[in-house]
Amino acid sequence: MRCFELSGTQTINDVAQALPEVPPASLYRHVKALVAVGALMERGTRQGEKGAPERLYAIVDDERLRFSFKGKARTPESLRRLYASVVAAQTAEFERGLRNGAFPAKYFHVRHSLIFVNEHELAEIRAMLSRLAEFTRNPPKGRKALDLGIALFPVKRRGHEAVTKNAAFMDDARRLAGALNALTKSPQFSNTKARAAARQEPAVNWPATKSLNADFNPEVDGCESFVMNDGSTCAWAPGQFRYVVQPRR
């Protein structure tokens, strides 16, 4: 893809000359895969060095590329082929760059992360990606060419649902812990003040809190802990002199 972005319409042989480290058979498959998913399109033919006609390929504009992934064209196999082709192209570009030695630190960054977003945050990410796309239209004069690859897709991991569920359950305990920890900074802080503040939090389960603190000794334990309606606990940590959040047991 990068070769077509930089040099425009080309034949497979043109790309092969620019990427000699990529086996011709692999290059041919990648180009065909990009055509199959609509990322590249044929732009006629050109007579090759041996006299035989060679097909010309060019990048499809963004609007057409998005359209090609709608409906029946958007299949697991088509996305798989596109992803594999883009990764292969970037890997080849990476290898070419290393021929001149290690990349300067300011020009090299690799990160693979699992992120958690809601619909509003996803919209923010998509806006950021649109902003990044604007840099592809910058005139090259006076600028450094950088290869930027981003892959964003939903994943499922073992235990992910449970972790997410527990995180949501702990929102009430986290809110109360924040309020009480603000009070601990005062010289007048005491268990009585903490309990009075907790009384203002409607999510506290007072029967469960009473049961949890049945053996509470202020001289030994310092402060009480509070059980929330969702089962999580805003627990006093004596060694840290602060409240911490514990998931539902």
Image: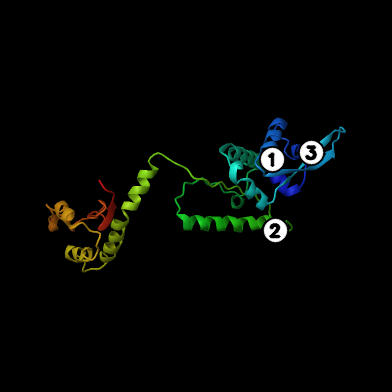
- Quarter of the image that includes the C terminus: top left
Q: Mark 2 and 1 residues: CB-CB less than 8 Å, in contact?
A: no
Q: Name the spot of residue 25 as percent of width and height, x first.
A: 71, 30
**Which of 14/117 is in front?**
117
Quarter of the image containing the N terminus? top right
Nearer-the-camera pick, 179 or 240:
179
Quadrant hosting residue 173: bottom left
Report the front residue among 218 and 239: 218
* Vertical order, 142 against 35 (above or below): below
Residue 147 appears anywhere in the view: no
Quarter of the rendering containing residue 40: top right
Marks 1 and 3, the one that precedes in the sequence: 1
Mark number for residue 138? 2
Residue 50's spot in the image, x, y percent?
Answer: 86, 32
Badge number at residue 35: 1
Q: Which residue is mark 3?
A: 55
Q: Residue furthest right?
A: 51
Amino acid type indicated by mark 1: Val
